[in-house]
Image (tube, grey):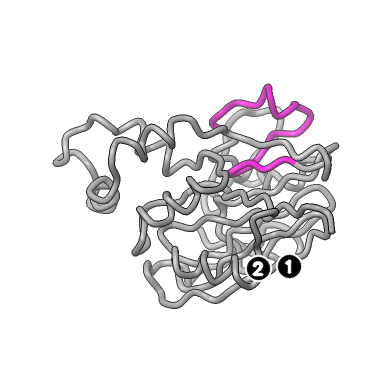
Amino acid sequence: MSRRTIVIGDLHGCYDEAVELLGKVGATSSDRIIFAGDLVDRGPKRRECVELAMRHEAILGNHEEKHLQQRHRADERLPPDHLETRRVLQPGHYDWMARLPRYLRLPEHNAIVVHAGLLPDIPVEKQDPYHLLHAQCIRPPAAKSYWPSKAPDGWNFWTHHWKGPERVIFGHTVFDAPLVTEHAVGIDTGCVYGRSLTAVVLPTWELVSVPARSTYRGGKAVARIPVHGDVSVFS
């Protein structure tokens, strides 16, 4: 059996679900396991999620980026949720986050793992780091990106524009179901909001999910905004 690559969506402290998901996919030491960023904040076991990813591979998420930017900021200047994360992390965790790549190429699967998205017709090596960590609704060639709930007319989700050649696996945007297109697979299904944690397993591209054990953070059960096909985003 050939070696599998298992890419897992945003954990946000949902460590128990991550362990359950790895068990459900039957992960072994011969599998390559990649976390798609945003390991921390919002959920209950932030340090455990970081240390789980440290034993495997991960890419940088916008939440890790924010913590690195604020690493030396005084406690009283941090939002309460970020302060909670700081209190469970140690310098070694930050040093590890600082070494995380913003993307991983998987040439054997003609795939790329990024946290958020890409602008079309630009190789991943030349993408603006902002888009790799934040891209949602765009209108090329403009560089601006909007949340779906704030996107003006004529701006739509970046997956409408990306035509490859690689298929992109990404998290960041919370969908009501995995977003699967010819050239992109979105796997943040909102575990921390009481929904589910999702992985995509290569080379078969099978999607595997486990339900959240609790609603750790509210706010993602109201408006759904259609973004691609029959998949909607909470935004």
Residue 211 vs residue 107: left or right? Answer: left
Magenta region: which residues?
Answer: 112-130
Estimate the x, y position of residue 78 in percent, counting from the top left. Answer: 22, 42
Element assignment for label 1? loop
Residue sitting at x 63%, y 73%: 24
Q: Of circles 1 and 2, which is in front? A: 2
Kindly identify which residue carries mark 2: 177
C-alpha span from label 1 to label 2? 9 Å
Estimate the x, y position of residue 162 in percent, counting from the top left. Answer: 77, 40
Residue at far front of view: 29
Element assignment for label 2? loop
Q: Is residue 101 magenta?
A: no
Q: Is residue 205 above or below residue 119?
A: below
Residue 34 vs residue 181: left or right? Answer: left
Q: Is residue 118 magenta?
A: yes
Whether pointer 1 and pointer 2 mark residues with C-beta atoms closer than 8 Å, the reply is yes
Circle on res. 57: none
Amino acid beneath label 1? Asp
Residue sitting at x 67%, y 43%: 113
Estimate the x, y position of residue 38 in percent, counting from the top left. Answer: 47, 49
Q: Is residue 117 above or below residue 185?
A: above
Residue sitting at x 48%, y 45%: 54
Kindly identify which residue carries mark 1: 230
Residue 111 vs residue 193: left or right? Answer: right
